[in-house]
Image: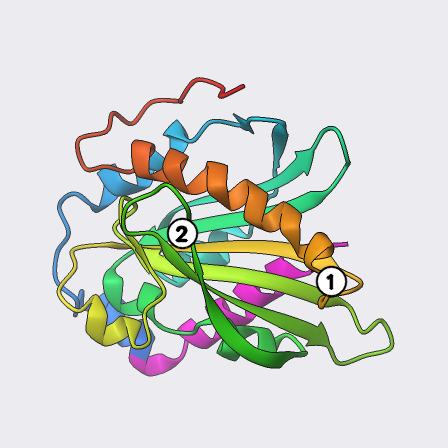
Amino acid sequence: MLKSALCLAAALATLLASALANGLRNDRWGAAPDLQGAADRLECVAPRLGEWESFPKPMSERQLKAAGVVGHLSRRFVHKPTGAEVHVLVIVGHSGPIAVHPPEVCYAGAGYRQQGDKVKHTVKGTRSAELWAATFVKQDATSESLRVFWAWGSGEDWSAADNPRLTFAGFPYLYKLYVVRPTARPDDPAEVQPASDLIELLVPELQRCLRAESPSSTGSEHG
C-alpha cells in the first residue's frame, strides 16, 4: 500500500506553522496573475501514458488549500502488462511555500528514514529535466521501502535543485513533482525500474501540457 500521501500530509502540517501561514495570508511572495492558469494546465495531463493507466488518488482539499497549493494532480499509475504501481503527485502554488520541505524533511515527519544518499536522475530525450532520487524506509514493523523521485520547476523545465528556495526565488509560481515507487528490495534495479520507465513518459507529457501557452483543457490519451 502506498504511503506517499503521508509525506504530503506531514509537509502540509509543517507549512501551517505561524510564520509561513502569515506569509501566505499577506501574499509575501507577490501576486501571481497567471497562477490559476498554471493550476488549470494540470488538467491537460493524459490519464493514459503508453501501457500505463492512471486512477485519481484523492488528497485533502482543506490541507492543500491551507498550505498554499493552488492546483494539484494526484494519480496512481498501473502498468497494465505487469501490474506495477507508481504514485505521481504534482502540486503548484506560490514559489515560496512550494520550494520548502523536500522529502528528506516531510518523509522523516511521516516516520521514514532516508537510506543512503540521494542521487540525480536525468530524464533521457528531454530538455532540462533532472530529478532527485532516494530510498526511504518506514521505521516500524513493516519496514516499508519507497523509492522517491522529486523535482521543482516551471513545468517545462524540471530541476534537482540543491537550494530550491534560492533557485526559484522570484518565480511567480512553482510546480513540484513527486514520483513514488513502493519496493520490497530497494537495491534491486528491477524493482525500481517501473518508476524510471513511467518518468520517461510522464516528464515529456508534463512539459507539453504545462507550457505557459498550453491550453487548460484535458489532453488526449497517449497510447
The span shown in magenta is 1-19
Residue 22 rendering spot, x and y as whole percentages = 27, 75
Of 136 and 28, nearer the camera is 136
Residue 195 rendering spot, x and y as whole percentages = 60, 49
Residue placed farthest to the right in the image? 141
Q: Amino acid at mark 2?
A: Ile
What is the crowding at mark 2: few (fewer than 14 residues within 10 Å), some, or many (at least 20)? many
124 left or right of 103 in image: left
Query: Residue 187: within the magenta?
Result: no
Classify the position of the C terminus by image quarter. top right
Circle 2 sits on which residue? 91
Residue 167 visible in the picture: yes
Give the distance between the C-alpha atoms of the residues marked 2 and 1, in whole angstroms.
Answer: 29 Å
- Mark closer to the chain start, 2 or 1: 2
Look at the magenta stretch and give its main secondary structure.
Answer: helix
What residue lies at 51% left-to-right and 75% top-to-bottom? Answer: 118
Circle 1 sits on which residue? 188
Q: Amino acid at mark 1?
A: Asp
Picture layout, residue 42 above or below residue 46 = below
Classify the position of the N terminus by image quarter. bottom right
Of 55 and 203, nearer the camera is 203
What residue lies at 61% left-to-right and 43% top-to-bottom? Answer: 57
Residue 72 rendering spot, x and y as whole percentages = 43, 46
125 left or right of 109 in image: left
What residue lies at 28% left-to-right and 46% top-to-bottom? Answer: 127
What is the crowding at mark 1: few (fewer than 14 residues within 10 Å), some, or many (at least 20)? few
Q: Secondary structure at mark 1?
A: loop
Residue 2 visible in the picture: no
